[in-house]
Amino acid sequence: MAVTTSQVQSLYVAYFGRPAEQAGLTYWTSQSGATVDQVSAAFAQQTEYTSVYGNLSRAQTIDTLYQNLFGRSAQSNELTYWLNSNDITVDRLALALVNGATGSDRLLLDGKVQYATAVTTQLGQSATAAQVNTTYDATVAGQGSNPVTAYYTNAATVALNTTKFAINGDAFQNGNGLAASDAAAANSVANFFSTSSATLAATNAGNATVALPGSSAATALTINGTVGDATGATANSSTLTFTEALATGETTQTLTTLNLGLSNSAVAPTATNIVATAIDSLTSINGSSSSAALTIDTTDGAAGSAAVSSLINLTSLQGGSGNDTLTASTAAAAGTTVAALTVDGGAGNDTIVGTVGLSALTLNGGAGIDTITANVTSTSAAVLTVNAGDGNDIVNVNAAFSGATAAHGLQIALGAGNDTLNVATLTNVGTVSLTSAAGITAANTSLAANSVKVSDFSASNDVLHLVTGSVYTALNNTQASNVTASASLAEATSAAIVAAHANAPTATATSFVYGGNTYVAIDAAAGGTLNAGDGLIELTGFTGGLTAGTNLTIG
């Protein structure tokens, strides 16, 4: 089997500190019977190699190879190891280092090989070794005494090919952001690609913008690095903005995945803001590899139920292990279709805000102490599902309107821990007439369909908190028995509200057991009758009592 382009480029970078010229690359990859060991040994006999390494000691050779491959000197333990590896001859050292690279060394080497391959391809068949070497160095001129090495170890390590654009480094630290020369270098790398280019601009305040053109063949953008202040002097916020604009003649955006692997520097920033708007091709934002606290808002920025999606095809939004703030919506402007979306907070103490519109929305808190806010618009036609997960979580229900048409449009699983469910406004009883001369009948099925379903409620661990101004009144045993014996949920809810009003004319809330569940009925107008616009919560599988001041609070 012939050696691969990547293997040959790795050897060129290691032995010669440059990409392969196309003629040399073609020659070595066409040697069908040659192994990579044999090619490596042949490289060590080339004049270009002996002119540099011929008079070097083994220790000096090792250090030069480390500089070419990884942009650094060999550490003392590494140097000792390779000096004592008597079974590995000098002509095989480069291959051994390439094969053994791990961690940041592997990422750096892979980036160099991708870049080297791009240079070879761009300059074409007629380019000489000298021309390739000159272009390789000139692209990153001004980055240090060794331009190539300095470029790959400075604030922005860029590895770009036709399927992926990645930035690795500390490009977004306050006081250590990208300088103009860094941005120019990134642009120069991008310009080697005929079908893909990118613009990276940043300021020393720790903010950066990555712009991809719509004609790019890139499908994924990966950002790895540190945020905050490397010097430990300040803790200002960092903002990363991603755009994909269409130039004249371009018709399709192509960025589908945004991967974030961000960690904090010496001083964590007050916020790491991720901004990506109007990229209709984007389907996934994945911050699961991040430990920094991410702030990601995929809406238009409006508050509460007014928020609409700014990434209409986004299906997945994931936080990392930090204390993330994630905001999402499946509501949209009239005539716009929005994809169903799942939001995963991750392991930190997360703040998640979700607004459901015409497509389903799922909010998963995960581990940690999470605060999840559920907004349901007046025109919602899809289910909003909240899974609070483990931890002592807080779930806020800001609004659930009677105009929602999805069955059980709001479903909440509290999960393990001591959880609090805050209900601010609840008007989810359907708009159909619930009263007539014959009274409430079993035919009024919309009441059950529109109830807010809450599972995992524990009488000893969890608290249901009703909005300020509510007046909760408990039913006596006789009233509770009569309600439980009702023929339908509608009859039971109506009877409970009537009985509570008889006990206290100002009553706005009561609870009752029916069909194996506990329900909380909210008489919004405190009129003593069940009407459209009232509220109903089903504590699924729970038949215990609600006691004011313990598992039920007001105000």
Image (cartoon, rainbow, N blue to C red):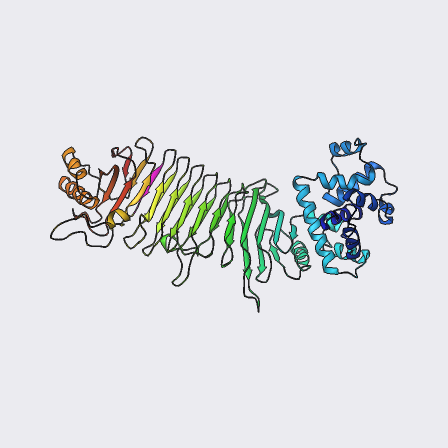
x%, y% of residue 417?
38, 33
In the displayed structure image, the side of residue 48 where residue 338 appears, left or right: left
Question: What residue appears at the point 19 percent right and 42 percent down from the top-left corner?
Answer: 492
Identify the residue at the far left of this view.
437
Q: Which residues are drawn in magenta?
A: 418-424
x%, y% of residue 286?
52, 47
**Residue 547 in the image: above or below residue 215:** above
**Residue 490 in the image: above or below residue 367:** below
x%, y% of residue 349?
45, 39
x%, y% of residue 552?
27, 36
Q: Which residue is at the front of the view, 179 or 308?
A: 308
Question: What residue appears at the point 51 percent right and 44 percent down from the top-left corner?
Answer: 270
Please identify the quarter of the rendering in which residue 194 is found.
bottom right
Identify the residue at the far bottom of this view.
249
Q: Is residue 423 magenta?
A: yes
Q: Which residue is at the front of the view, 74 or 488?
A: 488
Please identify the quarter of the rendering in which residue 241 is found.
bottom right
**Residue 83 showing in the rendered view:** yes
**Residue 176 showing in the rendered view:** no
Q: Quadrant of the C terminus?
A: top left
Q: Is residue 280 magenta?
A: no
Q: How many marks?
A: 0
**Residue 391 in the image: above or below residue 252:** above
In the displayed structure image, the side of residue 91 where residue 368 appears, left or right: left
